[in-house]
Image: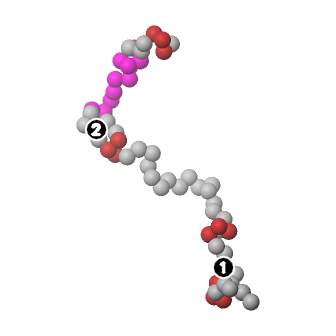
Amino acid sequence: MSTEDPGTQGARGDDDRTVDLSDDFVVLPEQTADDTDRGWGEFSGGNDDWLLAERPPHWD
């Protein structure tokens, strides 16, 4: 005698389900709009050149 519900015979549980992970499906973006220069109230662009020129000598 089986203790399972007779209406679920042959049904597979979530643990047995195969999931195709080959697609590049994006659920959330890599960066939110408020985590940008504009979101922080700064101008776009940057000072990367200045930061690289002002590197401490021990970083080389």
Q: Position of residue 52 (x, y in %)?
A: 41, 18
In percent of the image, x 45 and y 45: which residue is there? 30
In percent of the image, x 63 and y 62: which residue is there? 19
Nearest to the eye among marks 1 and 2: give it: 1
Disc 1 from disc 2: Cα separation: 51 Å
Question: Helix or strand or loop: what does disc 1 sit on?
Answer: loop
Amino acid under label 2? Trp
Q: Quadrant of residue 39?
A: top left
- Read off the residue under disc 1: 11
Q: Tag 2 or tag 1, which sits nearer the N-term?
A: 1
Q: Is residue 31 above or below residue 48?
A: below
Magenta stretch in the rendered image: 43-52
Q: Which mark is residue 40?
A: 2
Q: Quadrant of residue 13?
A: bottom right
The quadrant of the rendering that contains the N terminus is bottom right
Q: Position of residue 12 (x, y in %)?
A: 66, 75
Viewer-side residue, 1 vs 43? 1
Callout 1 touching callout 2 (CB < 8 Å): no
Q: Position of residue 10 (x, y in %)?
A: 70, 81
Q: Quadrant of residue 14?
A: bottom right
